Amino acid sequence: MTDKTASSNLISRIVYIAAIVIAALPCKELFGVNEIVTPAAALFAGLVFAMIFKVPYPKFNKNGSKYLLQASVVGLGFGMNLITALKSGTEGMLFSIVSVIGVMIFGVLIGYWLRLNRKTAYLISSGTAICGGSAIAAVGPVLKADDHEMAVSLGVIFILNAIALFIFPPIGHYFNMGQAQFGTWAAIAIHDTSSVVGAGDAYGPEACQIATLIKCTRALWIIPLAFVTMFIFRDKKGSKITVPWFIFLFVLAMVANTYCHIPVGITSVIVLIAKRALVVTLFLIGAGLSVSMVKKVGIRPLLLAVILWIIIGVSSFFVVMATIPA
């Protein structure tokens, strides 16, 4: 290793660790100033880092983004009232059933039309229909997808997921969407839970609660989808199904906050920590989106993902605006 390489590695480690520390700081509570690192800013910082440096701790980055996201979603549950959340999210949950099935059907048909690899098209459709990378990671082993098919599918979803965090809040404000409207729309139209919660948090507290609830409910579709996948892509040996257990912990957190009379001081601290953990998660996700991953994607998988995104984004927007009061 040359001195130049060693120096570059040292700088990347320092910048990486410093960025995580800064993202985790609750500036408003500690210093009385507005948050310097918002969810969108954290994701952007991660993307910039990925363009300049290699991730110094790739295993930590991958596992950290996964488990921090799960922990932050559970933590946000301590700030929600179960009864109120269920009433607010009913419309979104009903539309979720139609949209999940519709996106899967359109995805398979459009993928066939684009002459795209069958498994890649199925993975991209799963990620768009349910919850982004989590759905792909869960369905992939059942599908017996290889590393290239997984990498391409995840790359496409992560690219669009990053874009969504930046464009959805401005679109919501432009059309004067109410908190419930935006939260429902974001949960249905944005791929990954991280950007759904990030966009909802940027729009407002009620939007964040509704978006998180509907997205977590939507994530449960991973289980029936995995069984359907086993039937379509028959495998006599059977396949392991990854169950999103953190969703059940999220529900338990809401139940505890609603019925266990936990002091507000405690729940507010938990929610604060969860929000900062989400910001750190988005930085880690951005830092993991390397140039090589983008190059692997290819035009046809990206085209399929964009077409499906437009279908689900536009259709859900009109349904939400027509059925949910502002």
Image (cartoon, rainbow, N blue to C red):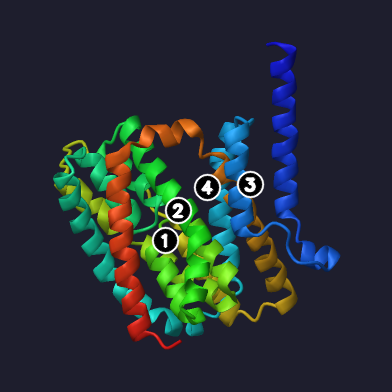
Image coordinates for residue 53, horizontal then vertical, percent: 63, 31
Distance CA(mark 2)–CA(mark 4) = 15 Å
Residue 161 is marked as 2
For marks 1 and 2, the one nearer the N-term is 2
Q: Are marks 2 and 4 in contact (CB under 8 Å)?
A: no
In the image, 173 versus 198, the foreground residue is 173
- Report which residue position mark 4 lands on: 66
> Relative to 121, does residue 5 appear above or below in the rendering?
above
For the point 71% across and 45% down, the residue is 19
- Report which residue position mark 1 lands on: 190
Q: Secondary structure at mark 4?
A: helix
For marks 2 and 4, the one nearer the N-term is 4
Q: Secondary structure at mark 2?
A: helix
For marks 4 and 1, the one nearer the N-term is 4
**Which amino acid type is shown beneath numbered disc 4?**
Lys
For disc 4, the neighbor class at 10 Å (few under 14, some 14 to 19, many from 20) is some
For residue 22, side relative to residue 98 (left or right): right
- Report which residue position mark 3 lands on: 45
For marks 3 and 2, the one nearer the N-term is 3
Would residue 285 be seen by someone viewing this image from the given angle? Answer: yes
For disc 2, the neighbor class at 10 Å (few under 14, some 14 to 19, many from 20) is many
